[in-house]
Image (tube, helix red, strand yellow):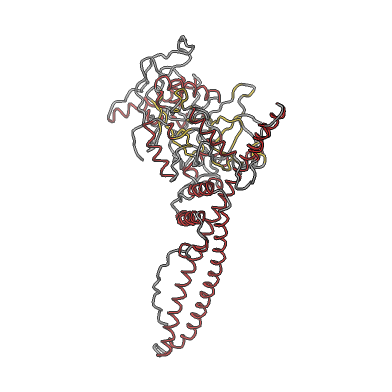
Amino acid sequence: MSKRKPLFVNPRPPRGACGIWGSGRPNPAGGAEFAPSAPAFAPSAPSGDAGAAMARPFAAFAATAALLAALALGHPALAPEASAQIAGARPATPQDAWNPKPAEGDFTVPLPCELSMAFRPVFIPEKGYLGELEGYFGSELQSANDETQSFSRRHKVYVGSPLSVDNLPEAYRATASAMKAKLSSDSDSRQLYLVGKYEVTVAQYDAIMKEGCPFDGKTAALPVTGVTWYDAQLFSERLMSWILQYYPDALPAMTDDARIVGIIRLPTEDEWEYAARGGHMVNRDTMNSMDFFPMELGEEASDYGLYYDEGAPPPTAPGRAGRRKPNPAGLYDTVGNASEMTMDAYKITVGSRLHGSAGGFVQKGGSFRTAYFKAVPGAREELPFFYRSGPVKSDDMGFRLVISSVNGGSIRRINELSEELSRASATDTTLIAADPLKTVDSLIQSAESEPEKQALQALRQNLESYNTTVNAGRKVAVRAHVWGLLYTMLGMRMNNAQMLNASAQRQIEINFIKRINDMIKEKNGTPEELRKLPEALAAREKNLARFQTFIEDAEDSFTVMRAHYETLLLEAKSFPQDLVLEQLDYVKQDIRGDDYFNRELRECDTRVDMHVRDVLQGKSPSKIPRTEMEVQAVSVKPPPPERR
């Protein structure tokens, strides 16, 4: 993995700028001043064998003292059962506590106490600000003794983001653009958000929430747990305030409105799950069909997360950040370790949608104590914000953060959104002879009373909403039409490949039959060989007839598939041309894999794209050469027949 230097180096904050909260004296603006502090480092042990011997009891004593002190102070990161794991562990370094596995493309923001926080960009491969990823999240996995799981089944979601590459800090923009360019030929730079690469660690939490930059190497790199949903919100608020005071340029920003910056907050449930499922690195069909994300051959879910696996000793505490493998989006510990809070209130699933009743908050990802079915990205659990005893917290629940922004964050963005909304709500006159919106506008202009005018304006709003829904459905229909063309082309090419193979096998049988007939005619062979030749000849002639029949059937199938393909091409002309071209680009997002199937689909897509564009320009589908629907013929030299 690349050891690329972080974008933002976090020097010691200005004097008086360490992350101390709650004890500073109020300033005139109503906030709190920062008091100076420095990171605490453990003394180094003497070198050599003697030093090692001295260090062992010292380390044990230090670990015990740190554990007792933390428990006495009510440290949120420690659970009683964690002591066995903490004792004797290699002390974490500051790097371990915020980015133990640096990688190309990491986006970092500074924290107090010479720490930082690493994020990964997650792209949403859609066009425009109104583009949104459509998918089915949640999970069908259930526990036999947990009836509430039926409330959390798969449901339809839409994921979008207000941020684009243009909003990112200039020093990171080229990196993000290069990552985007690898995913799609689409030049539209919109739609991304930044997700915490790791769960927030104890060291990061303490740097913001405690005085004096405390740093305990035994616990610093563990996910912070034992905090409430409100603690996570307070941490986000204080982190934002500190960054804006000392490193405001480290955050995304709107180019034409200096007031609007990127916002560090808890993720929504859908933001969390899309990223945990692999984000832009996993195509939609795979994401919608799996409870986990794709893994390499021989890998298991436990390679990516710490959770309770039946038959194995149960874990007793969370592990350090980044100890397991990252998911396809480059995120660590989205499976197990510490369960993670989200911004959203929990809603039960009804059919394929979420019910309107908002309950507690959504917890995702499972923890080291949960079984696999609760650790998969789609698992959803509801926790109350409060019990009667107080706000809810758990020693196996933490959080990670995202960076996003606001939807109406600049004049330019508002104008572009308005234009996209107008296009989305406009009536398609290719399908509707008379534009009802224009008719209603005319009626509004000629309205004789204010109540009549208001009623017509309400009708117009309803028509706009209806058109938006219809146009969204039409996009799905055109996309399905493009996929139909793609799979028909795939069928023709596979049929042709089988035909070529059968033709090669037929030629082999013809060569065998000729060779056997020559041997019979010339009596070339021993008496025993000559006696077996008629039987061998009959077997070869039977094979020849079988391959000949297959070729004839395959030719008939090709004719039927070509007719269907030509029909689909003609039907594409009935849709708005710009919508067809948009969906041709859209499906390219789903066939980026390196496996044989995706490579073949890309070959098919190249031909379909060309044929659709030709037909839209007036070319007849029947004029498309057959060679453009076939695989390249490969000459096969049959081996010589063995002597009988």
Q: Is residue 263 left or right of residue 346?
A: left
The answer to whether one can see residue 524 in this image is yes
**Above or below for 357 versus 178:** above
| Residue 339: percent from left, percent from top | 53, 33
The answer to whether one can see residue 65 in this image is no
| Residue 577: percent from left, percent from top | 53, 49
**Above or below for 70 versus 376:** above
Farthest left residue in view: 48
Which quadrant holds the N terminus?
Answer: top left
Instruction: Return the residue nearer the eye: 347 or 395.
Output: 347
Which quadrant holds the C terminus?
Answer: bottom left
Instruction: Return the residue nearer the eye: 368 or 202.
Output: 202
Instruction: Return the residue nearer the eye: 597 or 573.
Output: 573
Q: Is residue 573 left or right of residue 53?
A: right
**Above or below for 120 versus 211:** below
Question: Which residue is rendered at x = 36% and y = 15% of the image?
Answer: 15
| Residue 98: percent from left, percent from top | 41, 30
Instruction: Return the residue nearer the eye: 172 or 6.
Output: 172
